[in-house]
Image: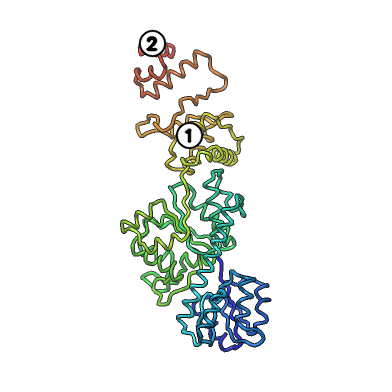
Amino acid sequence: MYTPHVLIVDDESASIDSFELILMAGGVANITRCDDGRQVMSLLDERPYDLMLLDLVMPHVTGEELLEQIKETYPNVEVVIITGIDTVDSAVNCMRLGAFDYLVKPVDETRLMSTVTRALEMRRLKRENSSLRSGFLSDALDHPDAFAAMITRDARMLRMFRYVEAVAGSGQPVLITGESGTGKELLARALHTLTSAENPFVPVNVAGVDDTVFSDTLFGHIKGAFTGAQGARAGLVDQASGGCLFLDEIGDLSAASQVKLLRLIQEREYLPLGADLPKPAEARVIAATHCDLEAARDDGRFRADLYYRLCIHHVHIPPLRERPDDLPVLMEHFVRKASTMLDREPPSIPDRLIRGLATYAFPGNVRELESMIFDAVSNCSGDVLPLASFRERISTENGSPRADMDLSDCMVFPDPLPTLAQASDMVVEEAMRRSGGKQTAAARLLGISQPALSKRLKRMAATDR
């Protein structure tokens, strides 16, 4: 996660000490001190700074001279003037030169911290805006390996990957939405790889978890917190320190747990069960849900303040049925994967099967497709992926073919090929199966009369005897 850097420039060491203590108490840790204005430009050359606290009255070079040089050479650095000069002309000139704010000594601690927080937030927004702009203007991913587990050639998916790359360094919460089976956890892992791959990725499904279990699981407890707590236990927030905490099915979280999660995100701290003092939270929160959180917010089932905190960065994964270009590449990938696991040569995929599956809604999305392919490869005894398992899996509850999928032209014959008479009987049997044994409907499918079909069926029955 990105940590802001602050430079304090003042010729009085006591003033630097005071400002440094206030900033550290407010959670700003990366602070550089400078008591000689002549060193400022060299320090900026060596490393990027997000914010500078700058005094105006200093020997050798004035703060106004420095401010003009800084804004000309490093315009992205936010500069807050802190000085004993309390004149309107000085303040107006500094603001004209690009200062973020103008504070007069002695500075109230609360106002200083509030100004620093606003300046760092402005710097963060500018940095993310720049990253987003460069990401959307480019068609290429900077880190394609991070998304290797998500097989796609869909344009929307690739744009989504570029957005994730752009916001990865912000450290802010990310909300991932999408139907079950679309790959929300895979995307969360990709985000973790982009930001803190060397640190832990800790996933937890919070669906149906009551508040006590939620609190103990995430925040842990101290010794004696409840009956049976014979020792302290670290929660998942602590285990994910420096990395990412992935909360799946966040839409099912109870109201009481939502309050605690809001504090974790907003204050970046949490309270272990039985503890009196909060602990700092060093993990980035990534949340996912298949629910419509906006509707849940409007209905009062999900806190509005938590919703807006989670939605700082929002990524929606489209369902598989809206990504027809992904179907062939996903099928090839899963066939190879299943064949490798089963230690066999991968069978070929009939084009007619791909056309047939393209009409299917895939309520289980990519996960359902993977399951279908593994089942078909397991039952494959030839060089071509069998269609029987797909017909069996994609059906209504009464066993009839689904209206949203048509595999009628997907006939694959066994090896060796049947004779014309055998093939004719196979077509008749398939028509009877699809019509549920109703001869009139089967005859209509075959393009013959019902008496002609009845005659064929009697002949086939006699042959079987």
Residue underneath mark 1: 357
Check the image and report above or below for 323 versus 463.
Answer: below
Residue count near mark 1 (Cα–Cα under 10 Å), binned few <14, some 14–19, many ≥20? many
Rendering coords of residue 220 (x, y %): 43, 68
Upstream in sequence: badge 1 or badge 2: 1
The residue lying at 52 percent from left, 65 percent from top is 125
Check the image and report above or below for 326 versus 195.
Answer: above
Quote the CA–CA distance across marks 1 and 2.
33 Å
Taking depth in this image into account, of 55 and 46 the one nearest to the observer is 55
Nearer to us of marks 1 and 2 is 1
Question: Element under label 1?
Answer: helix
Check the image and report above or below for 318 versus 385.
Answer: below
**Could you tell me which quadrant the C terminus lies in?**
top left
Residue count near mark 2 (Cα–Cα under 10 Å), binned few <14, some 14–19, many ≥20? few
Rendering coords of residue 189 (x, y %): 53, 55
Classify residue 404 by image quadrant. top left
The residue lying at 46 percent from left, 43 percent from top is 365
Q: Is residue 304 left or right of residue 423?
A: left
Residue underneath mark 2: 452
Taking the view exactly as shown, the residue that stands out farthest to the left is 299
